Image (cartoon, helix red, strand yellow):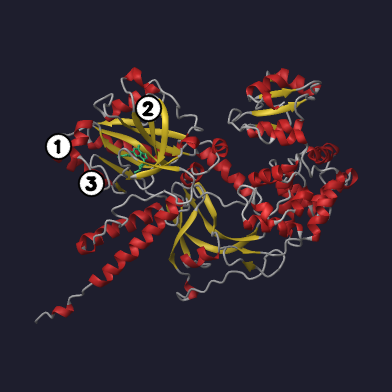
Amino acid sequence: MQLDLFDIPDNSAAEKEEILALRRELDKANYKYYVLSQPTLSDREFDRKMRRLQDLEALHPEMADKNSPTQRVGSDLSQKNGFRQLGHRHPMLSLANTYSEQEIHDWYERVCKDININPEIVCELKYDGLSISLWYEHGVLTHALTRGDGTRGDDVIDNVKTISSIPWKVESSKFNVQSFEIRGEILLPWESFERLNKEREEQEEPLFANPRNAASGTLKLQDPRIVAKRGLDAYLYYFIADDEPSDTHFGCLEVAKAMGFKVSDAIRVCHSIDEIMDFIGYWDTERKNLPVATDGIVLKVNDLNLQKQLGYTAKTPRWAIAYKFPAEKQLTMLKKITYQVGRTGVVTPVANLEPVQLSGTVVQRATLHNEDFIHQLGIQEGDMVWVEKGGEIIPKITGVESRRQESGGQYAYQFISHCPECGAMLVRDPEQVAWRCPNEEGCPPQQKGRIEHFVARKAMNIDGLGSETIDFFFEKGLIRNVADLYDLRYDDILSLEGFQQKATQNILHGIEQSKQVPWSRVLFALGIRMVGETTAKKLARRFTSVDMLRQATVEQLTEVEDVGIQIAESIQRYFSKAENISIVERLSAVGVQLESSDKLQTAQFVEYSNILAGKVIVISGTFSHHSREEYKDLIEQHGGRNTGAVSKNTSFILAGDNMGPQKLEKANQLGVQIMSEDEFLELIDSKDLT
Ligand code: IVH
């Protein structure tokens, strides 16, 4: 039989289409990942698509394009940010990476063959943060550049200087190095990441998917004081100088360590592929006990001359490769999609799953984010779905494996049209992805959520009123809004089941104390949409009373830093509602601070630091330089935490005159340090404020 040429399938056109589509998709994913810190693809998906593109481009050399994502390093350069951009002295390349042990064997063999000996290989952890290049001139830190597009980066030195493990000055001359560059990874440790997300959840701000995105979002903030509070850390892993202090990579890292840089101890100089595989096997499980996220192992030829001999491809060094740990994923059934209504009325779909074990925890719920996310994945109840928990703490649904039988393969999921809590018809802002319940005044989770927000530590800081108590009071009809809190009577609470005298007194005392909370925090506590803690501070500085704020025009409001049209309109919307005006008037009548005192205004200009990070501080007695509330603010502004009772966790007591006798006795018993007002002010270096 004769073969007709037309019988041979010609995939060429389809492949070319695919190349273009993949380039578009990867460009978009790079932008979302590096610039917006909001990844749209899992690392594994990204790598798979990149490989597919590489393979297709190899088949079609006529389609070569130096702008293809295969030829470029993803860029974190943002057009809008205010950082100075600088060219890298040495391009910041990425590493070739693989999920396959076989490819590690192949790489090692190729290296041995190319240089004709079995070289020493340094194995290190692959830290999952963002890379940074630090420049030191005569021992002084002068620049800190992000990777950018690999050729130029943003100089984020002011933010980097808040990271305590990065020295501002080192005695490099002792090691005969004048000027050098050191590269490493900036990370947000798990603990800080969880704390940050918890805070964001309380304030209904979008959560960070993983510590890497949180670190990258943090490093791009314009305010180093906020960066300082977040608790970033850095590990350094690559030393570059004209005249290196050692002939080996390992030797250079030892010198860096001696200079005071944080270099991980999880490093091993290996002499064979077996030793390399041992290292990989050990850290595959052991890495789960580390304080920071890692996603693989980096292998580097130790000898710097051999590195030079092996050289580079366009994008990566030939002398190094990364082995990536497989993401942990599981297949499970999506039993039901339920909906949660938050404080601001945003409706979030939640996947209720058949429980599965994933990275040591049982997962049974995962967020589905919003309607678009559901439709993009084509998810519906009864499907078998993939759940992943790579470097991420929040489990994610990454795809649908198979459809439930009854659907006959048809996709027909409909997002709800009415609020599951109050029945109101949902609305969707054309520019937003979220559906919202517009019934602000009458939708219970929104009403309760506003009260919870009001009493939160960062707002009115009312002790003794947790979300369960608020739920209970709400159900009993005692409170409907935040002003009702100030009408609560001793007997009303005491008559409720489960409330003894002490708890009742505590609640009322907390409410009474909240009348001292300064105006900027009261403004935040009101829960005006889009007015977060920082915005509230800035607004309160410019509009020193609620009346001034209420009368402000959109133009006046937008003169405040960070306040755009949307926030300004949100403020005006708040004050256009009779219910809100009545609440504000009632708050004012009971003595809540709805204007600033002069002293407090000064306190708002205080410089922030992290000097009290991790410190738990009890305040007791009366003070002469600042009020108790101002001291609470000062403690927070310097990274500490204020609590009510003395315990073994108390770091010290800030004691004024007439310290409470019980606190004094407890402090003596536990050996807790007592610090005077003057000592404290000296510690935070703000005596000039008095
Ligand atoms: S060495 C030329 N070592 O992984 C080689 N990189 O995919 C320079 N990374 O951009 C990099 N841990 O952000 C090296 N121990 C380690 C690393 C590491 C994490 C990151 C780094 C780099 C990316 C490459």
Mark 3 to mark 1 CA distance (whole Å): 16 Å
Give the percent coordinates (x, y) of residue 358.
Answer: 47, 49
Quarter holding residue 659: top right
User: Which mark, by number, is residue 313?
Assistant: 3
Check the image and report above or below for 637 versus 38: above
Tell me whether the residue at label 2 lies in contact with that at label 1, contact meaning CB atoms closer than 8 angstroms: no
498 to the left or right of 379: right
Q: Which dot, 3 or 2, sits closer to the camera?
A: 2
Disc 1 under 8 Å from ligand 1? The reply is: no
Q: Residue at x 76, y 30 (%)?
A: 628
Q: Residues within 10 Å of mark 1 (few under 14, many from 20)?
A: few
Furthest toward the right, the residue is: 491
Amino acid type for the residue under numbered disc 1: Ile
Q: Residue at x 60, y 47 (%)?
A: 200
Give the percent coordinates (x, y) of residue 408.
Answer: 46, 76
Q: Secondary structure at mark 3?
A: loop
Tell me whether the residue at label 3 lies in contact with that at label 2, contact meaning CB atoms closer than 8 angstroms: no
Disc 2 under 8 Å from ligand 1? The reply is: no
Furthest toward the left, the residue is: 1
Q: Visible in this render: residue 502?
A: yes
Give the percent coordinates (x, y) of residue 454.
Answer: 73, 47
User: Which mark, by number, is residue 137?
Assistant: 2
Q: Which residue is mark 1?
A: 115
16 to the left or right of 665: left
User: Which image quarter holds the C terminus?
Assistant: top right
Amino acid type for the residue under numbered disc 2: Glu
Q: Visible in this render: residue 265?
A: no
